[in-house]
Amino acid sequence: MRLSVIGCGYLGAVHATAMASIGHEVVGFDVDADKIGRLAAGEAPFFEPGFDELLRDTLATGRLTFSTEPSDLAAAQVHFIAVGTPQREDGDGADLRFVDAAVQGLLPVLSEGDVVVGKSTVPVGTAQRLADIVAPTGALLLWNPEFLREGFAVQDTLEPDRIVYGTADPEGPGVAILDEVYAKALAAGIPRLVTDFSTSELVKVAANAFLATKISFINAMSEIADATGADVTQLADAIGHDVRIGRRFLNAGVGFGGGCLPKDIRAFATRAEELGHGRALRFLREVDEINLRQRNRLVDVVSEELGGSVAGRRIAILGLAFKPNSDDTRDSPALDIATRLHGLGADVISYDPEAIETARRVRPHLTYARTADEALAGAEATVVVTEWEQFRQLDPETAADLVADRLIIDGRNCLDAGRWRAAGWSYRGLGRR
Ligand code: NAD
């Protein structure tokens, strides 16, 4: 099938490439000429495991092209909208300017029988509004929320755990056309749910609200664990054995970040307020607050361990990305903590296996190391804030030879505390004895 993907960021570039890899003819479109130039040259504009290879192999088939020219969209019958929906600058709601511009830009090339498929995460009510804008062209609009996880984006796009179509007409041709797009995944038995517009929009934000709540729940427990001498990791292990609770997403630490969870829960709570039902989602404000408080807690722990002030003290920060296997530093707790410690006068040196360039773009004033060893050299405190495998595997004996003081602060509770202590380190986690 002939597809277009409008917006080639973390979601769109992977979606375009994955769809072409399974046999469709795809044009990826973006207003960012630099990004399109790099993608067309086979160079991933961000770090995502497996994406580089998939991009190069798929470009070689000739089925995948990239363009900044709107007229190149005309050949496609199905147009995926994958542009950003960031938090508004003047509030907590979603900024829909990019989605609106993408749909307006498509109107001149749309005709009877075309299908516009929204993948971006949007406030409930958006799909119906956009369907009304598209309708005069004769094209149909469906909403097909995206659930990919950065770090697993290729696998999640090719083999999602479910596919949701929001439509005004469940018996109409739009569903059959999307079934053809996703024929391979559907043949593999991946569940597909056809819903109305509102449900499809809510599925996405409800899923993120649930995940965010789970993380903030365990972080709230970690605060109580700290106050009582309990151990939050053992607590999570114990409650996680209950299948109704489950152990995943129950790791206490500096909390969630990235380009989705924080802005999605804020936009969801804001949308509920607009609908006159703010009370129903007031707890999401608390979830957000607990999450942000974790960053203060970690900064306080570092300061406490250094005797009450970080000013002038050499601190190694391990991690900048909001999670491992990504270079994304949007709303990253790790980058935020590095920035705060720097602001308090600490001599901060940060290292991340993949996210230094993205961090440098937004925080050029921070100091970055080329290797973990360089960051550790002379450190009076070492702070792990992104749970990269490389940091989990650090050898406390070797690291001890590099640092000035054997103080390790585990902001992700991802290290083996016993091993570090056995090597003579003073270990601190969050909510962990
Ligand atoms: P991103 O910022 O990485 O990419 C957005 C892209 O859209 C940018 O390249 C930008 O240049 C482009 N763009 C903006 N206006 C445009 C226009 N008018 N025409 C063409 N391109 C335009 O964002 P992302 O992380 O890929 O997220 C995109 C959407 O997908 C958001 O709604 C997000 O919430 C949702 N989502 C993201 C993820 C994820 O893990 N990143 C997962 C699920 C859903």
Image (cartoon, rainbow, N blue to C red):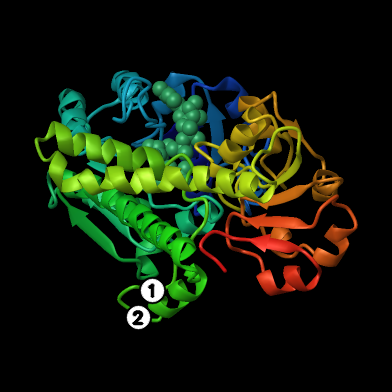
Q: Residue furthest left?
A: 276
- The residue indicated by pointer 2 is 242
Residue 198: name its quadrant: top left
List the single residue furthest toward the right: 401
Q: Residues within 10 Å of mark 1 (few under 14, many from 20)?
A: some
Foreground of the two, 180 or 19: 19
Please determine whether, in this image, residue 378 is positioned above or below residue 248: above
Front position in the image: 194 or 223: 223
- At horizontal 18% and vertical 49% (from top left) the residue drawn is 199
Q: Position of residue 154 (x, y in %)?
A: 53, 54
> Left of 248 or right of it: where is 54?
right
Q: Position of residue 342 (x, y in %)?
A: 66, 31
Q: Is residue 365 above or below residue 215?
A: above
Amino acid type shown at disc 1:
Gly
Q: Is residue 88 visible?
A: yes
Is disc 1 in contact with disc 2, using a CB cutoff of under 8 Å?
Answer: yes
Query: In terms of secondary structure, where does tag 1 sit?
Result: loop
Depth order, front residue of 298/178: 298
Task: State which quadrant residue 432 falls in.
Answer: bottom right
Measured as percent of width and height from the top left, residue 83 is found at: 41, 32
Q: In which quadrant of the rendered image does the C terminus lie?
A: bottom right
Q: Quadrant of ligand 1?
A: top left
- 242 vs 55, left or right, is left
Does 387 sit left or right of 267 as displayed? right
- Kindly report the distance in space between the C-alpha atoms of the residues bearing marks 1 and 2: 6 Å
The residue singled out by tag 1 in the image is 246
Q: Identify which residue is drawn at 61% across, 32% down.
A: 339
Residue 179 appears at what percent x and percent y? Answer: 30, 55
Circle 2 SS class? loop
Check disc 2 and give the amino acid type.
Answer: Asp
Q: Quadrant of the N terminus?
A: top left
